[in-house]
Image: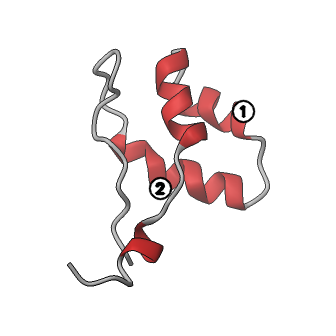
Amino acid sequence: MIPIIIPVRCYSCGKIIGHLWEDFQKRVKAGKNPEKVLNDLGLNRQCCRALFVGHVDLLKKISQFKV
């Protein structure tokens, strides 16, 4: 499994959110409503929700290039 670049803490409020990303991603891929999943995970603040909804996983594309 390729690691995902998601912040451990929310940039705005500092809440620890990094451990919730994989669960969020699995549920959304299974067809659940992202809003309901965020509510179930306890992400009620707008700043934390924006990090999850707005995240684009580019690690697979970036890893193709050598540094």
Quadrant of residue 63 in the image?
bottom left
Which structural element holds mark 2? helix
> Is 3 left, or right, of 24 in this rendering?
left
**Residue under the point 57% across and 55% down:** 25
Residue identified by numbered label 1: 36
Residue 26 location, x and y as percent? 60, 59
Q: Nearer the viewer, residue 57 or 15?
A: 57
Q: Name, please, the residue furthest toward the left.
A: 67
**Residue under the point 35% across and 55% down:** 5
Q: Amino acid at mark 2?
A: Glu
**Residue under the point 49% across and 34% down:** 51
Q: Nearer the viewer, residue 61 or 17?
A: 61
Q: Nearer the viewer, residue 63 or 32?
A: 63
> Is 63 left, or right, of 36 in this rendering?
left
35 to 33, vertically: above or below: above
Residue identified by numbered label 2: 22
